[in-house]
Amino acid sequence: MRSRVALLAAAVLLAPPAAFAQRAPSLADRVAALEQRAASEQNAVELVNQIGQLRSEVQNLRGQLEELQHQLEQARQSQRAQYLDLSGRLDRLETAAPMPASAPMTGASAAPAPGAAPASATAPASRPAAPAAGRDEQSAYADALQALKAGDYVESARRLREFLVAYPDAGLTPNALYWLGESYYVTQNYALAAQQFQALLDRYPSHDKAPGALLKLGLTQYGLKQYGQAEATLRQVMQRYPGTDLARTAEDRLRAMALAGSR
């Protein structure tokens, strides 16, 4: 009996090391699995951070794209407005076209030739030369405007240059300078356009085309990337002609310049 108890005791004493030996690999495997899981979780955190960063970059790119699309639409609207304004002003000029030619006729009737009859009806007939010259000037000018209205800007520029050579200081010379500048501006020949607008401002600062020429000078300077000069010129437009369409156009361009500079 005692021998059996001793044998059982010995078996109990010998059993735990064997059990522990069997359980040790299982614990090591669990530790390794936990370490692997921790590494995987760390990688997952890094992936989540990278995904968040990529999403932020995509949002920024979308914002920039939307801003560029907005600026492009503004540019298209501005271009359409310029063409509509150009067409409207051309129509008004054509409607008022005979006015410059009538000035020589008035002068001729006010100074009748010596010996002419006192009746007013005979005065215009006795001085045909001045009206003829006026018609030539007006015809050349109208011919150039017709090409401009038709959208043939190269031809309109050529005709306007010829007009300015033939009539360097006529009543329609300021108008020809302005529309020559427009012809160059529409074709993005900004350097030549700026020359015409500046010439108009220098020679005819009080002409009714001077305000528009000042605005277009600023726009051509912007086209030439002379941003400092463009800003100064456009601010002059706002100061000299407040509350006008010219001032609002200048303000819109200045706002677009400021927005582009902030990007």
Image (tube, helix red, strand yellow):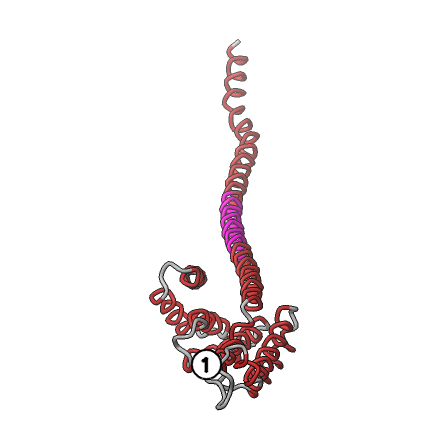
Total tally of numbered discs in the picture:
1
Would you call the spot at circle 1 few (<14 residues within 10 Å), some (14-19), or many (20 or more)?
Answer: few
Depth check, front residue: 221 or 42: 221
Q: Quadrant of the C terminus?
A: bottom left
Q: Quadrant of residue 135?
A: bottom right
Q: Is residue 92 visible?
A: yes
Q: Quadrant of residue 122?
A: bottom right
Residue bearing mark 1: 110
> In this view, which residue lies farthest toward the top?
1
Residue 124 position, x and y percent, is 54, 80
Residue 191 position, x and y percent, is 51, 79
Q: Is residue 252 left or right of residue 147?
A: left
* Residue pictured at 55% horizontal, 77% vertical: 180
Label 1 sits on a secondary structure element that is helix
Q: Is residue 196 visible?
A: no
* Residue pictured at 56% horizontal, 88% vertical: 165
Amino acid type for the residue under numbered disc 1: Ala
Residue 228 position, x and y percent, is 39, 73
Residue 141, above or below 151: below
Q: Which residues are magenta?
A: 45-68
Depth check, front residue: 170 or 117: 117
* In magenta segment, residue 57: yes
Residue 90, above or below 64: below
